[in-house]
Image (tube, grey):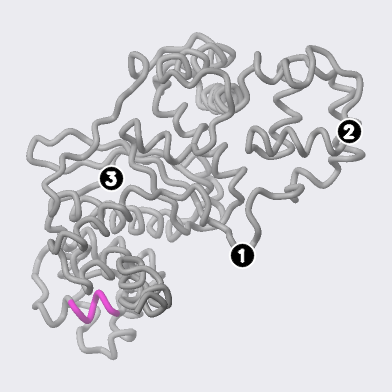
């Protein structure tokens, strides 16, 4: 419905009805916009273009040609997020999924089927059972014990749509379902905030994977959060592998050893220390001392990050959508302008991605 999309985009932009009318230089009155949102009137094509421009959304988003809607959105940080934050997140995800499905339709592809590795959703009696669940999932996916080099690529291979997008600072990530209507099965989606470090994004992906697997009614909200945290640590840092690298009990740990380990498992330094404590490798006193000495700033500042500030969000980002766009472009199924619209990039950048560095071509002439 145009009305629902319009209202969501307006909330995302932080406009009142009068504010949106003013942003459009009063080409449409606040009363008329209200009628559009309530479904009492339908805007003309010209008005739709002006609305899209003022709200900084695509025309296809407002038209809602695919009947897409988000369900099961869980803002686990809801207490600290505003209505505008939530509207921004939903609008961003709807736009991204709409573009994703557009290119799949163009290529006549079925959306990748989610390969749930266990009986979903899994009932847990207590949060600690998430350790065994993580081990079971790694076994079903034949991951062995080695560290996972690319969490995003892994989840996309298994049929989850992963979106790495810029979200409000208060939202690190969430999982949701995308309803498509027409009897099509819902698509599971995991969204992560590209404002945050790669270490945090990987943990968020594993955390949200747990929420996709665990039955929401089997634990209290607090225990489910704890279970998801345990799952993420166990999935990214398997107990057997970690104990082989560190030992089963340690009285002390050095800075460089911890940094090498966080780079091996591609996790945050703080998460590594908490995992060592959870497994009993270090005592509570050793953990406390670490956070008071060599790791005193690790809760707020990541040591020796996996990606620099300039690279933020570029490593381990979702790539399947980009590959599909370039596939459709190379096959002549979409124009350069359409590819640029789908990828949200300048035409020159998309053309360079298709043809490669022009300097190389010139050198061969």
Residue highlighted by disc 3: 70
- Is residue 120 left or right of 241 when viewed as pictured? left
Callout 2 secondary element: loop
Callout 1 secondary element: loop
Residue highlighted by disc 1: 310
Whichever of callouts 2 and 1 sits on the residue coming sooner in the sequence is 2
Q: Check if mark 3's residue and mark 2's residue have beta carbons within 8 Å.
A: no
- Is residue 109 left or right of 72 when viewed as pictured? left
Q: How packed is label 3: few (under 14 Cα within 10 Å), some, or many (20 or more)?
A: some
Residue positioned 53% across, 43% down in the render: 77
- In reply to whether residue 168 is colored magenta, the answer given is no
Q: How packed is label 2: few (under 14 Cα within 10 Å), some, or many (20 or more)?
A: few
Q: Main secondary structure of the magenta part?
A: helix
* Disc 2 to disc 1, C-alpha distance: 29 Å
Looking at the rendering, which quadrant does residue 111 occupy?
A: top left
* Disc 1 to disc 3, C-alpha distance: 32 Å
Q: Is residue 153 above or below residue 140?
A: below
x and y percentages locating residue 322 in the rendered image:
33, 55
Residue positioned 76% across, 36% down in the render: 260
x and y percentages locating residue 319 in the rendered image:
38, 50
Q: Check if mark 2's residue and mark 1's residue have beta carbons within 8 Å.
A: no
Which quarter of the rendering shows the C terminus?
Answer: bottom left
Foreground label between 3 and 2: 2
Whichever of callouts 3 and 2 sits on the residue coming sooner in the sequence is 3
Callout 3 secondary element: strand
Residue positioned 87% across, 28% down in the render: 253
Q: Which region of the structure is painted magenta?
A: 49-53
| Closer to the camera in the image, 233 or 229 | 233
x and y percentages locating residue 187 in the rendered image:
25, 37
Residue highlighted by disc 2: 254
x and y percentages locating residue 174 in the rendered image:
44, 41
- Is residue 302 left or right of 162 when viewed as pictured? right
């Amino acid at each position: 419905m145009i009305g629902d999309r319009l209202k969501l985009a307006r909330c995302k932009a932080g406009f009142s009805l009068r504010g949106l009318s003013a942003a459009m230089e009063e080409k449409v009155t606040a009363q008329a916009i209200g009628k559009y949102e309530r479904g009492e009137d339908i805007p003309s094509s010209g008005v739709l273009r002006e609305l899209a421009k003022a709200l900084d959304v695509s025309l296809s988003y407002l038209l809602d040609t695919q009947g897409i809607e988000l369900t099961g959105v869980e803002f686990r940080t809801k207490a600290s997020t505003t209505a505008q934050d939530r509207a921004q997140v939903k609008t961003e995800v709807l736009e991204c999924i709409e573009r994703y499905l557009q290119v799949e339709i163009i290529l006549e592809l079925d959306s990748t089927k989610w390969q749930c590795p266990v009986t979903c959703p899994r009932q847990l009696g207590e949060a600690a059972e998430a350790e065994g669940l993580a081990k079971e999932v790694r076994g079903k996916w034949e991951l062995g014990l080695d560290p996972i080099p690319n969490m995003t690529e892994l989840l996309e291979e298994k049929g989850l749509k992963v979106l790495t997008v810029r979200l409000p600072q208060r939202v690190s990530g969430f999982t949701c379902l995308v309803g498509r209507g027409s009897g099509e099965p819902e698509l599971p989606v995991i969204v992560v905030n590209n404002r945050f470090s790669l270490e945090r994004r990987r943990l968020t992906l594993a955390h949200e994977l747990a929420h996709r697997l665990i039955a929401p009614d089997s634990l209290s909200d607090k225990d489910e959060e704890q279970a998801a945290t345990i799952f993420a640590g166990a999935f990214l840092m398997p107990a057997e592998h970690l104990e082989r690298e560190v030992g089963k009990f340690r009285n002390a740990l050095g800075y460089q050893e911890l940094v090498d380990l966080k780079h091996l498992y591609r996790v945050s330094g703080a998460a590594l220390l908490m995992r060592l404590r959870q497994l009993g490798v270090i005592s509570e006193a050793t953990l406390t001392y670490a956070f008071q000495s060599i790791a005193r700033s690790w809760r707020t500042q990541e040591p020796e990050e996996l990606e620099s500030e300039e690279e933020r969000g570029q490593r381990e980002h979702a790539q399947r959508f980009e590959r599909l766009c370039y596939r459709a472009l190379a096959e002549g199924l979409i124009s350069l302008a359409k590819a640029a619209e789908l990828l949200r990039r300048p035409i020159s950048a998309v053309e360079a991605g298709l043809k490669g560095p022009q300097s190389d071509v010139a050198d061969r002439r």
